[in-house]
């Protein structure tokens, strides 16, 4: 009943206010346009505003109809009224997508214009109105303008269902006092339900963006678009999730780096089959200086590595081995960016969830964790890594960090599941898989090997020191040197073979066993001679960008600003974009506090651990692992900032190893007990509010990143998405 009241009355209160008010509807006469043969006003890049004066009425809404190129346009409505007689004050900011028509005529007479209605409440009587359109690239025709157009009453069933489910959840939590319940007190079915709901929160956010990024929602003529040679955008002429494997050199040049690398592997070569310009062949190391290339008008293959007369795709082979090659073997086709983003983002979320579960189970936290902290904390921290924002990069640049996050999660899962495995065969199979995953991580994001070793090495060290192994209830056997050696070989052989293969590949391609090709990349920075002096200025800039920079809520809800400017030309032109730091997500604010509580509560105490079959000292392992990761993560951020660029992709992948441990700390120390102090109870609810804010912001924030691709995407989905929040989005 409350949901029906909110949807039918509160969300439509402007309909009732208009109906009960005394608002005079006025149709504004537009000037006659000879080219169109009718009354209309034409917006152009040189003439973006229409000024209306000479009326005197109380104003609540404005309605108009637009025709033009069917792309997303932003606009503002400003007015002068009894409260602002001199300077027009912005009354609303809106987004529209005119009906697509030919330039100045064509289908103008036969195609109905797209109608829009906006709230512009005046303070007293309004005297002038200014309609302005931004980012107009062609011609936009205003064919109708009405003041005080009657708002429509609309009942949104999806919004009603969402409010009803949210209300039901609040009632359930309150009536069943779930905030006092621990996971171990639930039935097995209820425990699975809590875990599933937490996972569904993240997957729901990710899948909603996957839906928006389907090829059917994208302009079909935009398969190729970028400077110099280019790469595939989301769209393709067939609007298909699968793309035909390139048959010609020209087709190959317009595909992404992973398709080019796959093509090279199938041909038995390391370099990619793209043409090399004579000017590039005749250039020396100055080729890698973007300033020299621009001055001498030399164009290399954008974002590819050039070495000794050949081009290479320096991007790792991880995504190829995980998705591209298996899909090609099965279908003879390669994935579209839409399909690849869906696959890698889903793998990232599932991997992080599995890793978090195994970690909490290993340390005996899961049965004692508070239900709500576990449910919302898991989702908030996983989303708080900004993985969904990375998913909305809409290009192949997002594949590696998403896959790396998923692989780190799987590495966590295997590392902390092995000590609980009874079967020797199952344990050694897991060790082999662990070694293969680390090899894949190196071929996806090489620097992530360091935090992965920080996760695995304490576990391995605990196994080495263990002397007994509990195979079952009351069955304890010796964990002798022979068993340890066989276990070490299971993980060591794949690692050694992978290291040998990787170093051989690097030497054959770039003449160095540790050179992955980044130094010889032709891009917007000179990475061959890139350097960054270790100064307080650079260090503070890195901290501000990677850690503290927050979201900017300066746009229309549900949009959050993430396209921020940052320091440039640090070192030898270090580029940066999308500067949103870790602490933009409230779920991460309490990391230091949780660590302090951890230290205070764990003085000499060993938590019960039912799945540690090797008598490992769990708290020692946790302290060592956390210390290693907390040292390595800032170090990796600085290294990437110094050598590559600062961008949210690198922040996301570096936070992935830490995410599971943050969930562990929250779940261990944040709870609600009747005997708790008032401060502890306030802290509990404050943490839950932080989780909720994180989920909402990370769920809506990627809209801002997608806005830069609006010209390539069908805009109606974004308008409908914003209309979902109407009238909240129109109240200013």
Image (cartoon, rainbow, N blue to C red):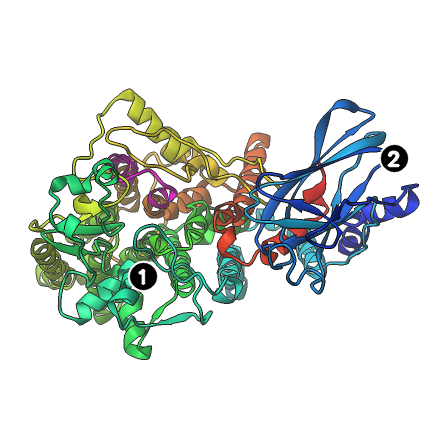
Magenta region includes residue 515: no
- Quadrant in which the N terminus appears: bottom right
Label 1: which residue? Answer: 254
In terms of image quadrants, where is residue 571? top left
Residue in front for this viewpoint, 401 or 510: 510
The residue sitting at 39% across, 31% down in the picture is: 566
Query: Residue 451 placed where, x, y %?
Result: 25, 45
- Quadrant in which the C terminus appears: top right
Whichever of callouts 2 and 1 sits on the residue coming sooner in the sequence is 2
Residue in front for this viewpoint, 143 or 57: 143
Query: Residue 711 placed where, x, y %?
Result: 51, 52
Query: Residue 134 placed where, x, y %?
Result: 59, 41
- Asked whether, in this view, residue 302 is left or right of residue 387, the answer is left
In terms of image quadrants, where is residue 407? bottom left
Q: Is residue 148 visible?
A: yes
Label 2: which residue? Answer: 57
In terms of image quadrants, where is residue 471? bottom left
Magenta span of residues: 629-651
> Measured along the vertical axis of the image, is residue 327 above or below residue 442?
below
Give the main secondary structure of the magenta stretch: helix
- Asked whether, in this view, residue 691 is left or right of residue 630, the answer is right
Q: Is residue 557 visible?
A: no
The residue sitting at 90% across, 48% down in the picture is: 19
Counting other residues with Cα less than 10 Å from the Cα at mark 2, is it few (<14), some (14-19), or many (20 or more)? Answer: some
Residue in front for this viewpoint, 194 or 711: 711
Do callouts 2 and 1 mark residues in contact (Cβ within 8 Å)?
Answer: no
Q: Secondary structure at mark 2?
A: strand
> Measured along the vertical axis of the image, is residue 535 above or below residue 172?
above
């Amino acid at each position: 009943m409350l949901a029906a009241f909110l949807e039918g009355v509160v969300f439509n209160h402007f309909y009732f206010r208009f109906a009960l008010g005394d608002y005079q509807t006025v149709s504004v006469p537009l000037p006659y346009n000879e080219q169109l043969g009718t009354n209309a006003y034409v917006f152009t890049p040189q003439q973006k505003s229409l000024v209306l004066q000479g009326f005197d009425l109380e104003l609540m809404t404005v309605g108009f109809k637009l025709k033009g190129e069917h792309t997303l346009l932003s606009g503002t409505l400003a007015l002068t009224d009894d409260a602002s007689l001199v300077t027009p004050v912005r009354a609303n900011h809106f987004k529209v997508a005119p009906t697509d028509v030919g330039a100045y005529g064509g289908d103008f007479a036969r195609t109905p214009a797209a109608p829009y209605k906006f709230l512009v409440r005046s303070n007293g009587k309004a005297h002038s109105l200014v309609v302005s359109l931004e980012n107009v690239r062609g011609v936009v025709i205003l064919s109708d303008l009405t003041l005080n157009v009657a708002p429509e009453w609309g009942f949104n069933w999806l919004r009603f269902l969402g409010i009803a489910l949210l209300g039901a959840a609040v009632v359930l939590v309150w009536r069943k006092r779930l905030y006092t319940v621990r996971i171990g007190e639930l039935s097995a079915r209820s425990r699975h339900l809590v875990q599933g709901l937490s996972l569904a929160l993240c997957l729901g956010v990710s899948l909603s963006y996957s839906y928006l990024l389907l090829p059917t929602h994208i302009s079909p003529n935009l398969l190729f678009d970028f400077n110099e040679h280019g790469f595939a955008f989301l769209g393709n002429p067939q609007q298909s999730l699968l793309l035909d494997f390139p048959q010609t050199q020209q087709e190959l040049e317009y595909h992404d780096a992973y398709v080019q690398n796959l093509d090279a592997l199938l041909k038995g070569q390391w370099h990619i089959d793209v043409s090399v310009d004579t000017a590039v062949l005749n250039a020396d190391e100055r080729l890698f200086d973007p300033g020299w290339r621009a001055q001498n008008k030399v164009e290399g293959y954008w974002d590819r590595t050039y070495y000794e007369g050949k081009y290479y795709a320096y991007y790792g082979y991880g995504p190829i081995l995980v998705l591209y090659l298996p899909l090609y073997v099965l279908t003879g086709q390669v994935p579209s960016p839409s399909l690849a983003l869906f696959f890698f983002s889903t793998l990232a979320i599932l991997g992080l969830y599995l890793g978090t579960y195994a970690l909490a189970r290993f340390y005996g936290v899961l049965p004692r964790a508070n239900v709500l902290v576990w449910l919302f904390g898991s989702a908030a921290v996983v989303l708080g890594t900004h993985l969904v924002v990375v998913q909305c990069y809409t290009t192949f640049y997002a594949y590696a960090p998403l896959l790396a996050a998923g692989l780190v999660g799987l590495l966590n899962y295997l590392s902390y599941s092995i000590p609980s495995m009874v079967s020797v065969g199952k344990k050694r199979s897991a060790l082999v898989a662990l070694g293969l995953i680390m090899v894949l991580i190196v071929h996806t994001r090489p620097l992530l090997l360091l935090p992965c070793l920080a996760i695995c090495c304490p576990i391995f060290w605990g196994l080495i020191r263990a002397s007994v192994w509990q195979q079952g209830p009351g069955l304890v056997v010796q964990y002798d040197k022979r068993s340890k050696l066989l276990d070490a070989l299971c993980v060591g052989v794949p690692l050694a073979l992978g290291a040998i293969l990787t170093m051989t590949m690097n030497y054959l391609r770039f003449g160095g066993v540790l050179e992955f090709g980044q130094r010889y990349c032709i891009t917007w920075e000179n990475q061959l001679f890139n350097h960054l002096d270790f100064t307080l200025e650079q260090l503070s800039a890195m901290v501000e960008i990677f850690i503290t920079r927050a979201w900017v809520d300066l746009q229309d809800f549900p949009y959050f600003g993430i396209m921020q400017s940052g320091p440039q030309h640090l070192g030898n032109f270090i580029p940066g974009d999308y500067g949103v730091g870790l602490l933009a997500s409230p779920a991460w604010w309490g990391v230091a506090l949780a660590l302090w509580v951890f230290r205070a509560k764990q003085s000499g105490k060993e938590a019960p651990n039912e799945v540690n079959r090797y008598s490992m000292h769990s708290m020692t392992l946790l302290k060592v692992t956390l210390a290693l990761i907390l040292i390595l993560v800032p170090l990796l951020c600085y290294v990437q900032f110094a050598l590559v660029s600062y961008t949210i992709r690198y922040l996301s992948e570096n936070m992935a190893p830490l995410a599971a441990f943050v969930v562990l700390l929250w779940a261990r120390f944040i709870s609600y007990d009747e005997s708790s102090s008032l401060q502890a109870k306030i802290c509990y609810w404050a943490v839950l509010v932080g989780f909720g804010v994180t989920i909402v912001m990370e769920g809506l924030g990627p809209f801002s990143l997608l806005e830069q691709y609006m010209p390539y995407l069908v805009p109606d989905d974004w308008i409908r998405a914003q209309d979902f929040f109407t009238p909240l989005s129109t109240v200013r």
